[in-house]
Image: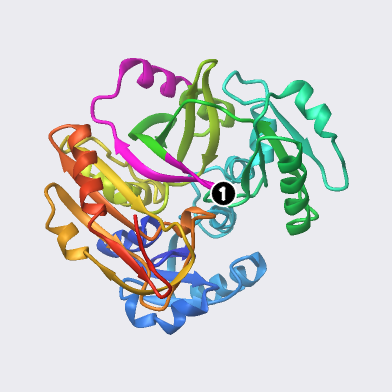
Amino acid sequence: MKTIIFIGTNKSGSSREAIKAAERLGYFTILFTNNEKQLRQRKEYTDVHEMIFLDTNNLSEMEKEIMVLQSKGKDIKTIVSFIDSNVHRASILCDAFCKNVTSSKAIGIMENKEQTRTFLNNQPYTPKFFVIKPGETIAFETITTQLDLPVVVKSPKSTGSKDVLLAKGKEQFEKHTANLLEKNPNESIIIEEYIEGDQYLVEALICTSKVQIAGIMKQEITRGKRFIITGYGVLVDVPIEVQVGIEAVLNSVISQFDIQNGALHLELRRSANGWKLIEINPRISGGAMNKMLQAAFGFNLVEETLKLYLGGNPSIQPRCMNHVFTQYLVVSKKGTLGKVTGKQRARNSPGVIEVYVKPKKGTKLMPPLSMGHRYAYVIAAGPSMEEAKIFAQNAANEITFHLAEETIER
């Protein structure tokens, strides 16, 4: 039985859509999960043909389970993950049990922000940075002789904007470094220059050393306690200077890592000093990314990524060209969700393609400290990017999260 093993999934978003794509492609799908809630909600995962509860941080435990599956006749074609730090572990397992077309070494470096910064240290698109090793102290005054304020303080294993903090002065710098040190005493801390400028995200596949750009998105950032992306505009008519700049960084990254095959996305800022690489992730972005690209260009990126991992030739040639904007919703205060109103009005709004609301009644909501604290999104299309954005925001404004203490509107 042709089988694909997935290491972890979210209930919705790109990682879940990849499992559904595998089922459509005719594969038996197995999910390794350490999430007990998914076991309790087993009936809601009909696209998962077999769900196995184990420690997805433990390679040897997963290896034993894979051998058991093979002994039962499962023909494992690939082992993959579309979830943050599981991507590297999945690739290592794929090395051991399947034909792996991707590079575990490159994935391992890209998953760690310290290793990525060090690996690309001499490239012009790498921001200035310091690394504070465990047990080491670097004085604030030393930092500010080489980096202008504000600076970004972050964990090298941060994902989804968790543990990425802005320090505008000495007090914030010392507070943030102390908090990260207390949280992860055996990990380094990265201090890097804060880059001003518009932020873009590029999704790409590499097949036999040829780069295919799936989409370039202009991002809108909500700055509270964290940097949270709340808006994505999928660019149909990419300005030539943006296209050239992003392609130059992307091609350099792929060359430096010597990537023959793989999937990744880059986040970049266009600063007064040129393009700067904010981060790399060796996977498609989560959340609504797969659906917004499908709405804009007609292809299913996670499905094409699976074809690549299976040794095939992916095709992300646009089938259509639509201006698409995605608006995410967050809340400004803590509270317990009583109900959500306006979902149907949002769905009936002009240009709307999809409305998704994540939390159920009784869920505790809070202002965002990570991307996981975005509680809903609206995808809309329009005759232009400006109109698509207006459609998405107007529909999003119809949605209200009613908290137990008070009503909070976006």
**Along the viewing direction, whichever of 231 and 336 lies nearer the viewer:** 336
Q: Look at the picture and state if 246 lies above or below 390.
A: above
**Along the viewing direction, whichever of 160 and 82 lies nearer the viewer:** 160
Q: Quadrant of the C terminus?
A: bottom left
Residue interval drawn in magenta: 221-248
Residue 225 part of the magenta segment: yes
Q: Residue furthest front?
A: 406
Q: Quadrant of the N terminus?
A: bottom left
**Along the viewing direction, whichever of 194 and 185 lies nearer the viewer:** 194
Residue at 27%, 38% in the rendered image: 316
In percent of width and height, residue 74 lies at 43, 72
Residue at 15%, 61% in the rendered image: 345
Q: Look at the picture and state if 235 lies above or below 39.
A: above
Residue at 62%, 26% in the rendered image: 127
Residue at 49%, 51% in the rendered image: 99
Residue 234 part of the magenta segment: yes
Amino acid residing under circle 1: Lys
In percent of width and height, residue 271 lies at 50, 20
Residue highlighted by disc 1: 225
- Badge 1: residue crowd in 10 Å (few <14, some 14–19, many ≥20): few
Q: Could you tell me which secondary element the residue under label 1 belongs to?
A: loop
